[in-house]
Image: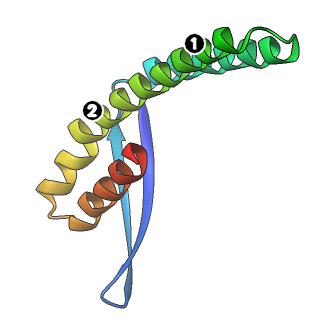
Amino acid sequence: MSDNHNHTHSHDGHDHNHTHTHTHTHTKAVLNRLSRAIGHLESVKRMVEDGRDCSEVLIQLAAVRSAIGSTAKIILKDHIEHCIVDAVETNDTAALDELNKAIERFMH
């Protein structure tokens, strides 16, 4: 499965466009996990609508959060294995900067 990534970076007062084509080996697994997390979150929403116990809702939300976190780890692993390897090979420091920003936002 091939994904195209178009990046526009602005640094040193100049805009730089980078187009990367990579094969992401975990795309199907990520989509499956996201679908399951969406379904789980929908069921949590129904729990709230039905007035279920707050403790039960919180436990299920924790499970959804955990599922999202494990999905993010797969995406990060895939990104490092493909995009970042290519970025290092082509000396694309902007891609490394983007990765650092994404990690900061996700971990925040």
- Location of the N terminus (image quadrant): top left
Residue 22 position in % (x across, y down): 33, 42
- Residue 107 occupies quadrant: top left
- Residue at x 87%, y 17% (from the top left corner): 49
Residue 88 in the image: above or below residue 11: above
Q: In this view, does 54 lie to the left or right of 19?
A: right
Q: Which residue is drawn at 35% across and 58% down?
A: 101
Q: Where is residue 85 in the image (x, y as percent from the top left)?
A: 17, 46
Of residues 38 and 45, the one nearer the viewer is 45
* Callout 1 secondary element: helix
**Badge 1 density bin: few <14, some 14–19, many ≥20, Cα 10 Å:** few
Where is mark 2, residue-wise?
77
- Looking at the picture, does residue 12 appear above or below residue 49? below
Is residue 108 found left or right of 33 in the rendered image? left
Looking at the rendered structure, the secondary structure element under dot 2 is helix
Determine which residue is flagged by label 1: 59
Whole-number angstrom distance, CA of label 2 to CA of label 1: 27 Å
Q: Is residue 64 left or right of residue 99?
A: right
Dot 2 amino acid type: Lys
- Of residues 45 and 58, the one nearer the viewer is 58
Q: Which residue lies furthest to the right in this view?
A: 50
What's the amino acid at mark 1? Answer: Ile
Give residue 36's mark.
none
Q: Of the residues tagged 2 and 1, which is closer to the observer?
A: 1
Quarter of image, res 98: bottom left
* Residue under the point 30% across and 88% down: 12
Residue that extends furthest to the bottom in the rendered view of this protein:
13
Locate residue 42, reporting x and y percent: 74, 18
Q: How many marks?
A: 2
